[in-house]
Amino acid sequence: MNAMIRVAVLLMILAQRASTQSAPTLILTDGKVFTADSLHPWAEAIAICGDKVVAVGSSADIRRLAGRTTRAISLGGRVVIPGINDSHDHLGEAALGPGFSTGPSPMPNPASQVVLDSVRAIAARSSRGTWIRTPIGIGVLGDPTVNRAALDMIAPNNPVMLHAWWGHGAIINSAALRVLGIRDDVQDPLGGWYTRNANGRLTGRLDEYAAWDAQRRLGSMQPERELTRSLRETSDSSLRFGVTSVQDMAGFMTPELTARVFRAAHIPLRIRLIRWSIPTATSLNTSEWKSIPTQVAPRVIVEGRKWVLDGTPIEEFALSRTPYPGRPGWYGRLEFPADTMRAIIAAALRPGAPQLHLHIVGDSTAELVLGYMEALAPDSVWRKLRVRIEHGNSITGDRIPRAARKGIVIAQPRGDVPYKSWRAAGITVAYGSDMLRNPFVHMIGVVTGGSHPAEALSREEAVRAFTYGAAYAERREGEKGTLAPGMLADLAVLSQDIFAVPPQALPATRSVLTIIGGRVAYSGLTSKRN
């Protein structure tokens, strides 16, 4: 930094200090600070007063701001980034209760016989009525012999739920159906369906909103103290990864229970509960959140509404323009009839409507949604609303400029996606974990481009997607997501330099100091007072 710039920065810092009329409560010096602020992306030190950043600059300049009571932490050259904002998670999945694992992978695909043998063995040593639950892959979900009848034979006295690890589809037995109150004459909910045999009896397979309805019923039966404990454990784990904000797709518990659990947990994370309603057979059921206040707790708010419009390529329900391999004539399917889908999109245009979050994976689904948006309102109107597409894998080719013109934000992209092309078009991308919660595992694909290296982002661009981009996705970029004067003091000090280590080393990264609102929420560092 040359002398003139140094003087200008110091004068700015002194002016900021004079305007606050108080010394910083905390300063962090001797670091490598990535601010995610495009105007001043790098610094050495940060000054915090209360819950806000008041200055960034050189270590020498920031030290001059310290007062008698200022706490000072020397970072020893460690990297600092804004707090990571997880734009797409499912914190309530713990409401499904304890389960067994068939292996260490977070994406298991065990053989059918392995799952059946495990269920049989667990049922034999479990008391009557004990739930038996495990995640499964497409090998089991797609096996018609793994059904209600097969599970009844090996676990007649225990409710069993086999649920797809990626969240789309489940298989349950008769005991589970009884406990959950799902009868053979149940009607399919809007957006979901029950598989039935020739006699109309449920086979045990539940898809989309039918499966999520069953999971919500199960989740809402769990003891609240266990739900609160699990939420605290998840929060503690998130803090160790440098996560400071989570946008939760709140669907695994009833809205009333969700509010009570988050209120009781008193976790330090900033939580945005996104309404994920479960439709009935005749209604989208959007009124179920009406009794829940917008501010559930000091750091817990209710905003936005999510709809799942199609499935995924794994179970082959994402609506595709080309048939699925080996299934001539099968293109996937929409969750809702076309007129219902259009009404969902149109509702976002009403004054005061919640921000719209649309799960879209198939390219045909994306084409339909963009067409509906173009028919319903000009691009200029949509740009103000920041409609979110969750996953967004199908925003490719000529759909990229169309989405960009509408101000669409892509949250939680997964796999080989055109990061660089999205950015060049002006589409904001937001990181989301979708329950695979190590953010630095996800960062590998962003900075390498997967099988499309030309679509990779730089490390700085990737971190902005994990911080500023996710804040923009929740319309909070004026409050958090960057480390600049006036912004919330949410940040993470990392165990290694994520801007320098090889991509495959990124998953080992942890936060050694996580600060939320100027307060230490997690620390593995020692510190000293100035």
Image: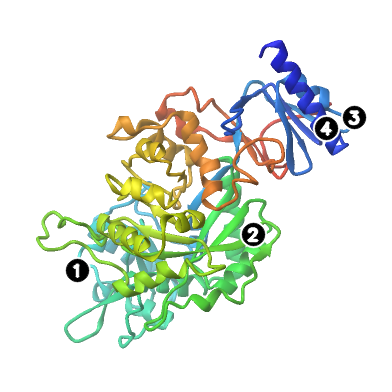
Q: Observer-nearest residue: 150 or 396?
A: 396
Residue 111 vertical placement versus 217 (above, below) = above
Q: Which residue is mark 2?
A: 300
Label 1 – label 4 distance at C-alpha: 70 Å
> Callout 1, which amino acid?
Thr
Residue, far top: 3
The answer to whether residue 85 shows anywhere in this view is yes
**Mark sitting earlier along the chain (3/4):** 4
Residue 56 vertical placement versus 409 (above, below) = above
Q: How is the image coloured?
A: rainbow
**Mark sitting earlier along the chain (2/1):** 1
Left/right of residue 68 with respect to residue 299 in the rendered view: right
Left/right of residue 296 with respect to residue 191 in the rendered view: right
Label 2 – label 4 distance at C-alpha: 31 Å
Q: Nearer the viewer, mark 2 or mark 1?
A: 2
Residue 363 location in percent, x, y? 26, 54
> Callout 3, which amino acid?
Arg
> Callout 4, which amino acid?
Arg
Q: Nearer the viewer, mark 2 or mark 4?
A: 4
Q: Which mark is residue 145?
A: 1
Residue displayed at 43% across by 38% down: 441
Residue displayed at 58% across by 64% down: 227
Q: Which residue is mark 3?
A: 68
**For the residue labelled by badge 4, is the local secondary structure a helix, a strand or a loop?**
helix
Residue 65's image quarter?
A: top right
**For the residue labelled by badge 2, is the local secondary structure a helix, a strand or a loop?**
strand
Residue 237 location in percent, x, y? 57, 46
Label 3 – label 2 distance at C-alpha: 34 Å
Q: Which residue is mark 4?
A: 17
Left/right of residue 121 with respect to residue 512 in the rendered view: left
**Mark sitting earlier along the chain (2/4):** 4
